Image: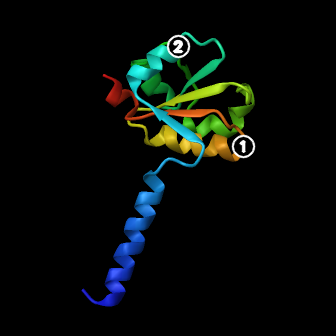
Amino acid sequence: MDLFQWVIALVFVFLIVKWLMPAKGISTISGAEVQQLTKDKKTQFIDVRTTGEFKRNHRKPFKNIPLSDLNKRSSELNKEESIVLLCQSGMRSMKAAKQLKKQGFTKIINVRGGLGGWQ
């Protein structure tokens, strides 16, 4: 590989790593740790999978707000309370976490590995 190809490869790797890394101010927890938070009445639990995915398999006390609807439905969420986000693998919920952070939410928690890692 010549220098140009190495530079392109390094930029590509950097962008992938940056995309996968949690944003500053977003916590991650395991599915087992979610169980401890379910007792907290001041925590909001949001599943960002599609409505169909949610209907087929979901966990209590998670409420379904699909990622595609999150921006327009974020007013349903309390900025003063913690928000735990869940999806199938943890990728969509991390994207949701970043969207909420841009909207001024500060207490955001992503479930690492999503529902798939929980089982």
In the image, taking residue 44 as reference, residue 6 lies left or right, namely: left
Q: Quadrant of the N terminus?
A: bottom left
Residue at 38 percent of width and 36 percent of height? 89
Give the vertical position of 86 relative to 17 (above or below). Answer: above
In the image, taking residue 4 as reference, residue 83 lies left or right, namely: right
Type of residue at label 2? Thr
Q: Which mark is residue 36?
A: none
Could you tell me residue 24's position as x and y percent?
58, 48
Amino acid at pointer 1? Gln
Cα distance, mark 1 to mark 2? 24 Å
Label 1 crowd bin: few (<14), some (14–19), many (20+), radius 10 Å: few
The mark closer to the camera, 1 or 2, is: 2
Label 2 sits on a secondary structure element that is loop
Q: Quadrant of residue 3?
A: bottom left
Residue labelled with disc 1: 103
Res. 2 image quadrant: bottom left
Provide residue 19's location: percent of width, then percent of height.
Answer: 47, 55
- Residue 95 location in percent, x, y? 53, 45
Q: Residue at x 52, y 13 (%)?
A: 38
Question: In the image, is residue 98 above or below residue 8?
Answer: above
* Mark 2 Cα shell of 10 Å, populated few (<14), some (14-19), many (≥20): some
> 68 or 40: which is nearer to us?
40
The mark that comes first in sequence, 1 or 2, is: 2
Q: Which residue is labeled 2 in the image?
A: 38
Which residue shows up at 43% across the image and 37% down it? 90
Please provide percent x and percent y for residue 23. Answer: 55, 49
Q: Residue at x 39, y 69 (%)?
A: 12
| 86 sits left or right of 102 in the view | left
Q: Quadrant of residue 107?
A: top right
Count of numbered circles on the image:
2
The outermost residue toward the left is: 1
Please say if 100 is above or below 79: below
